[in-house]
């Protein structure tokens, strides 16, 4: 087998393109940060950080706008929980402290999970709509406010969780019965 000789280079076969020109039309949009639907509420009560561990880790001098008071009515609590559930705050959501060292949230052992929703406001000064179990703490659950937290992973509704388990081959028969019974279905 004989190798073929390369063809001689021909300058006339070169094609050159002119450098593209960028033309800007109109004004550039202003750079803004994305609003946080929980934290940037239109109305609210401004005060010091309410979640104890956030206050201890950050400062009492920071002023935060909260959507409801520290002694809310049952109706206010229900509306608050529903409004924030849309944004991922609910049982099973993984959260981090908003008011803490700027790099603290990077470490999973600093995260927590929302274990329970406090649907009934009490007369306790330590009320918070969410009860958090912090991964790095052996302390009991801490009462917290959505405005003091941010979502690492949003809560899942039970139907989606059942679908995820079924897709991975888990027998969900027993769990489906529990979900049906909690909805009041026959």
Image (cartoon, grey):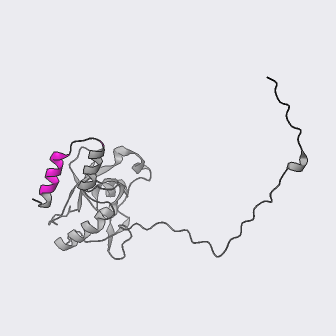
Q: Is residue 168 above or below residue 155?
A: above
In which quadrant of the rendered image does the C terminus lie? bottom left
**Could you tell me how many numbered marks the image carries?**
0
User: Where in the figure is residue 47, as x and y percent of width and height?
Assistant: 32, 69
Q: Residue at x 35, y 57 (%)?
A: 151
Confirm whether the magenta stretch covers residue 174. yes
Front residue of this view, candidates 101 and 113: 113
Q: Is residue 54 above or below residue 173?
A: below
Please identify the quarter of the rendering in which residue 171 is found.
top left
User: Where in the figure is residue 64, as x and y percent of width and height?
Assistant: 36, 67
- The residue at the far top in this view is 1
Instruction: Please say whether residue 160 is visible from this viewpoint.
Output: yes
Confirm whether the magenta stretch covers residue 170. yes
Magenta segment main secondary structure = helix
Please identify the quarter of the rendering in which residue 55 is found.
bottom left
User: Where in the figure is residue 74, as x and y percent of width and height?
Assistant: 17, 71
Q: Which residues are magenta?
A: 168-181
């Amino acid at each position: 087998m004989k190798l073929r000789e390369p063809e001689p280079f021909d300058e006339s076969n070169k094609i050159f393109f002119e450098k593209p020109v960028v033309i800007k039309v109109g004004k550039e949009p202003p750079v803004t940060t994305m609003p946080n639907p929980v934290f940037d509420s239109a109305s609210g009560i401004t005060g010091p950080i309410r979640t104890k561990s956030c206050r201890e880790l950050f400062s009492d001098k920071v002023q935060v706008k909260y959507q409801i008071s520290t002694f809310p009515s049952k109706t206010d609590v229900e509306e608050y929980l529903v409004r924030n559930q849309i944004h991922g705050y609910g049982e099973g959501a993984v959260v981090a402290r908003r008011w803490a060292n700027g790099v603290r949230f990077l470490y999973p052992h600093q995260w927590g999970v929302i274990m329970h929703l406090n649907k009934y406001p009490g007369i306790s000064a330590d009320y918070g709509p969410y009860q958090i179990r912090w991964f790095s703490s052996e302390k009991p659950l801490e009462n917290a406010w959505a405005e003091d937290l941010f979502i690492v992973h949003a809560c899942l509704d039970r139907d989606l969780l059942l679908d995820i388990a079924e897709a991975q081959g888990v027998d969900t028969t027993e769990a489906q019965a529990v979900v049906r019974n909690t909805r009041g279905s026959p």
